[in-house]
Amino acid sequence: MARVEAIPALEEAASVAGPRQRGLWSDAFHRLTRNKLAMMGLIIMAFVIVLTILGNYVDAVQRYDPRVQEFERLQDPSWDHWFGTDQLGRDNWSRTLQGLWVSLRVALGVSVVVLIVGLAIGGLAAMGGRTMDNVMMRITDIAYAFPDLLFIILLRSALQGQDLPILGDPIIQMIIAISFVGWVTIARLVRGQMLSLKNRDFVTAARAMGASNWRIVFTHMLPNTLGPVTVALVFGIPLAIFAEAALGYLGLSVPIPTASLGKLVADGNRYIETQYWLVLIPAAFIALIMLCFTFIGDGLRDALDPRSR
Amino acid sequence: MTGYIIRRVLWTVPVLWAIVTITFFLMHSVPGGPFDKERELPPTVRANLEAKYGLDKPLLEQYVVYLENLLQGDLGVSMESQRPVTEIIKEGFGVSLELGVSAFVFATVFGFTMGLLAALNHNRPGDYLGVFFATIGSAMPNFILATFLVIVFSVQLGWTDVIGWELWNPQKMILPMVSLGMLPAAYIARITRASMLDVLNQDYVRTARAKGLSEWRVIIRHTVRNALVPILTVLGPIFAVLVTGSFIIETTFAINGVGSYFVSSIGARDYGVIMGTTLFFAFIVVVANLVVDLLYAVVDPRIRYG
């Protein structure tokens, strides 16, 4: 089939006369930059992420080894130890950075796994006919009856200490446990979006022109589900951070001597009446990250779907 | 209608069975048994203990035995304390229920008030206050909030106790209740605000105002009553989450509820208690979802025929 060539004169006229054409995503990005809370969240998160990476790989930023117990115990914050020292005489600044790195890696891993699994299963349920759809919905029913955090805890303790290749890594185990609960939301969303897109005129038109099923799914339907999916993914990040912190709080995150934010809170709780910054600092970081991602999520939702305001 | 109710009630059976099965096999894949202590047990003692609890039998046989016992209401025995699991749950559930119900009442009253305040002051300071609260509240894990509250009210001001729970004793009641109830309160506030704003824009509200009814009467009789429907439907799941989800708060404030038994049994690999508490929690969630679905069907005829 011959393609219609762009007419140079018309293109020129458009660029001179009307406002520049913007696609959905650059338009959304433009709206997002005008959302103050979302931009604040983005800037703070960018700062925290850079700080965390530097703090785990650059000695000058990390300052001390988070595992070595060489200082006087339970020191107040000072010029030498910005966040003080813990109950075993370890530098709390480096331990907090280490805990942040655990949280961020888990959150990133969960987002990637949940996106892939959610798109695949949600897409299959929508495009794969009735039986597939029914099985999918029954699985969701069961997943809803299981209290989320309870299941994550059970799964994490079942995986813990198992002698498995690759899966033996505690971070990967936490990613699996949290993703197991998280994919359901994305899958349901993708299914709903795809089912409603399936009967839209532009899909019918593509089909009439002889496009294959794959082409329809990948070039026409998938891009149209990505907006809501992105929003749901960003809102999923605080939940993953929370789940990891809760696991750490119950002693089911990374094994000692590695620090995680939840474990720092749990350890610090014992000294809350005398050295309350021990618990305040990691708690504040958890709350800060969750709040930033909530703001970013709110901003993205408004930017991608201006009608929802 | 009867057909729908029967189908919906029967559907809880396979859901509960699936949960029993998943939990059972997950539990038994946890590395190390309940008798792996720091101090090595003599092999004969260990063999006897394992025989007593049937741990020496094939996994599938243990599973069948567990299901049989379960059908008779027997949740097995705690291998740690040798007590029946049902007894442990009975003992702990009183406290968990007190805590859950107080948090539920707090969440409903506080959340509803904030949502109402926000909706009636749409785009004015009251609204910003409500939305601010709803955002902060929904981004704050309960044990982090508990930490902040303890630092301010117990450590700095000395008004409340650091640990413990006692109904009607404000020093031991307020912090656990508020920490647990804040997240659902924020959620209820969000829904109340959205639902109220929606109803306030309806034609019949304009009609009521046009008739010359007092603003107070318009809000109480014509708005709030209609805005309540979406709020009522989320209360069921919230109740279930509060009663079953208090284990972290129970651990934080050293409260001896079912949740704290669950947490300590995970560390001790006490199969009986882990299974029992998990099933008990799942049962509450399933029943709460069932009640909500049935109420939906009563309120909205489209569902029972759909």
Image (tube, coloured by chain):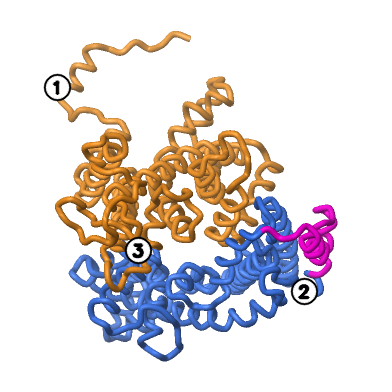
Chain colours: A orange, B blue
Q: Main secondary structure of the magenta part?
A: helix
A246 up-or-down from B129: above or below = above
- Quarter location, residue A76: bottom left
| Residue topped by disc 3 | A268
Tell which subunit mark 1 falls on.
A
Magenta-colored span: B40-69
Whether B174 is among the magenta residues is no
Q: Residue at x 53, y 41 (%)?
A: A118
Residue B145, percent across and down? 34, 68
Front one among A61 and A307: A61
Determine the CA span between mark 2 and mark 3.
Answer: 40 Å
A289 up-or-down from B133: above or below = above
SS category of the residue bearing label 2: loop
- Label 1 or label 3, whichever lies nearer to me, is 3
Q: Residue at x 59, y 40 (%)?
A: A121
Front one among A175 and B137: A175
Q: Amino acid at mark 2?
A: Asp
Q: Amino acid at mark 1?
A: Val
Residue B66 in sight here? no
| Residue topped by disc 2 | B74
Tell me whether marks 2 and 3 sit on the same chain: no
Of all residues, the one furthest to the bottom in this rendering is B168
SS category of the residue bearing label 3: helix
Tell me whether marks 1 and 2 sit on the same chain: no
